[in-house]
Image (cartoon, coloured by chain):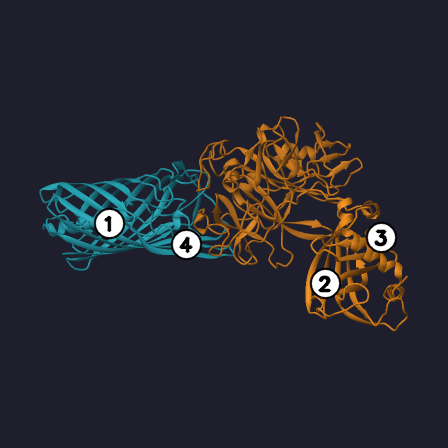
Amino acid sequence: MSFKFIKFALLVFLFIGMKDPAFAATCSCAGVPLLTTIDTSASEKGEFFISYSTEFHQISDLVSGTKNVNDETDRDRNSFSQVLSASYAMTDRWSVSALVSYVKHNRTIGSSFLGKTTTSGIGDSVILLRYTPLFITPFSRHLISLGLGVRIPTGDDDFGDNFVLSEDMQPSTGAYGEILWTSYSYAFNQAATVQFNTSANYTVNEENDRKYAFGNEFNLFSGISHAIGSKFGYSAGLRYRTTRADRRFGFDIPNTGGQWLDFIPGISYAVTNHLNLGLSGRIPVWRKLDGVLQFTTSYAYSFSLSYGF
Amino acid sequence: MSSKAALNHLSFILRKISAGTACFLKACLLSVLLLPVLLASQPVKAASLPLSLLNEGLNDAWFNPETDGQGFFVTVFPDLGLVVLAWFTYDTLLPVDDATANIGDAGHRWLIAVGEFDGNQALLDIEIASGGIFDTSTEINRELDGSIVLSFESCDKGTVEYDLISIGQQGTVPIERIVSDNIALCEGLAPPAPKTCKRPAPDLSQGIDNPPVIRGAIVPLSEVIGGGPGPDGIPPLETPQFITDLSATSISPFELVVGVKIGDDIRAYPYNIMNWHEVVNDQFSMDGSSEHVTLSYCPLTGSAMLWKSFVESTNKTFGTSGLLYNSNLIMYDRETGSNWSQMLEQSINGPQIKRIPDRLPVVETSWATWKAMYPETKLLSERTGFSRDYTAYLYGSYRENQSLLFPVYNSNDLRLHRKERVLGINVGSSSKVYPIRSFSSQVEVINETVGEMQVVAAGSSGHNFGVIFNRELEDCTVLDFVAVQDSLPVVMRDNEGNEWDIFGTAVSGARKGQQLQKTNSYIAYWFAWTAFFPGAQIQQ
């Protein structure tokens, strides 16, 4: 069994399974799942991966606590994000990943005279430094990786034709964030075609210029990935996510924060030894949202493409 | 006597004068010659009352102290509505050295003007007579030579504004009496001046009148921010339903309501519903026709307003813009899309910029109090067409804590708890607040002056209300009030014995049916009031 095959099996997980957003949508809806798309593929010294991904995120469910509520305002809210990501292994154990994002937010309230609001622009960026003390190899079935990162507000956070739009409609959070990241994988067989994967991250969100801070959040993903031959792979997992309430001037913003459990299925296809495609979705399973009423994720899907050198 | 007949009569008088009827002219000349002596012996009264109508008390010799040796005779004919002015003056240049005159100076000139008066002003035609010889009957030529506006600001001061065609010259001559004897007569004959009082009208706007427009708005655009939900994301109620069978309601007696009384139509809009919708587009019967109104309540600033819709609008409704200024609701009108600041009660940008809505009174109080005052009231129904839990409060502990959800001006003014409900009033640049909880449990009335306005504030912490009116009436009477207990909606009695209700309407006494003037006042959270109107005094 070659290292290349094992690497493909890992990619199935990395590409479509490890959907751990650094932050995501709550009622405040801002949320470009940056860590979802950051490329953490490079694992051998000198390897360089570059990837592009897009995600469509529909945010139209109106939820009170755990119950869905009818929304008679005929609201349609979604975000479309594009992320360019790269990773480079400086040594066999140390690698660095980085991404930049471009975000478009759409909001239409059917009953409104004023109709549709759209914003778009460069969003936040992330740099993540990873240390991987343990790899899956023909001689080891465990992978452990640890990371430390920073989210950088590289885009606009004061978008608006005349007035400053709310934070959820801004392409960028306008604030730095500190990221702790870890990942563990276990290969059920020597070829590592079937793996259990789990990862977790915690992000501390700072205040932006308008003294607004998205709530700190924790994500935990666990799932199974299966590589079929050297071309196809699929994965399925659950992601638990919890966020604190957003804050302004240090005070909690009502109706933000909560807990989410999502089902995340995905498939991948290796076009060549260097080029991989991935498709994944995010389907809410359960959620318990803080406050009385929040708009939150209805569903999301993403497509990704990566190239390794 | 008609004006024409009067003019004919005056013409006769003038002919007499210009023909040299001695007494009149002689008296004039004598007055002018004796002027310095008279001035020295009889000081002129410094001032007298404003004069609203010319009268015969003005008939006298007048002069301008700056032009020695010249003067005027004024004769008012009240029954004719006419004034005659004789102006004894000189030519525009000194006579040449060899000029001669048999009597007096060769430069002597006299002008006669006559015309009707209106109020304290008369418009006179100047007539120049020529061809006469001293004490001899001759044919006299008369020519019009311009006009004079004669006006009197008081019984001892006036002005002569002349426009003389022959010399192409205009000017104004201030005049005063040579002697003051007739001032008393003039003042005695003057009709009493209309009583003037200082009752200031409420300002046009809660904010600055006629504020400057910068970048198309009257508030800094950078401080108008999106609250999150977007336009109409907080859905206004467009066809509100009302409950008349109050026994079927489950509303807490302590729940605050926005009470509206227009004629006999009385309605209550509970906060617990308004928190979710913020705007209700409703209709009331006014003066026999159905009028659109918009009731708004901002849960972040605790302020409620009722605006009458614009007559000219096809779409008379307002929506929630999703924007906030000083954390306060900004509405938009669906006719033009203009944005309106609720607490400024003014359009802040868009086609309607600076426009001020026609405001209608509301009373905010507990449901128990409102229902007790107006048992016939209707109550806004929870059957709104929206799936909302009206038993839940949307904003957590916001009402109790010091939190701010959005930037506001003057946020460090912590003289009161930020969420203290205050009744605030603006009069010119003066602003004052009365914390609702600082009123006594029973009805308390405060008579005082805010800015230049005499106001009366009535409130009760027990009943959770506060209202404020101008206590100076249109007839300049300033009333003093005392509280009336246990008679709601009657809250106060004035020093004339009239009783007034919570909407400022006299319900008994000689003034029954009269309405105290509205003021620029409403209830809001303290942080919001001091954000919009920094420096407000606080009632202790």
Q: Secondary structure at mark 3?
A: helix
Mark 4 highlights which residue? A160
Mark 2 highlights which residue? B162
The crowding category of the residue bearing disc 4, from other C-alpha atoms within 10 Å (few below 14, some 14 to 19, many at least 20), is some
- What's the residue type where badge 2 is placed? Tyr
Cα–Cα span, label 2 and label 1: 91 Å
Task: Give how far across and how far down residue B416 sits, in percent.
Answer: 50, 31
In the drawing, what numbered circle is on residue B400? none
Task: Give how far across and how far down residue B511 sits, in percent.
Answer: 78, 38
Q: Chain of mark 3?
A: B
| Quarter holding residue A217 | top left
Asked if residue A71 lies left or right of residue B23, the reply is: left
The crowding category of the residue bearing disc 1, from other C-alpha atoms within 10 Å (few below 14, some 14 to 19, many at least 20), is many
- What's the residue type where badge 1 is placed? Ile
Asked if residue B540 lies left or right of residue B261, the reply is: left
Mark 1 highlights which residue? A38
The crowding category of the residue bearing disc 2, from other C-alpha atoms within 10 Å (few below 14, some 14 to 19, many at least 20), is some
The reply to whether the C-beta atoms of the residues labelled 4 and 2 are less than 8 Å apart is: no
Asked if residue B299 lies left or right of residue B60, the reply is: left
Query: Which hue belongs to chain B?
Result: orange
Quarter of the figure that contains the N terminus of chain B: bottom right
Asked if residue B454 lies left or right of residue B229, the reply is: right
Cα–Cα span, label 3 and label 2: 22 Å
- What's the residue type where badge 4 is placed? Gly
The crowding category of the residue bearing disc 3, from other C-alpha atoms within 10 Å (few below 14, some 14 to 19, many at least 20), is some
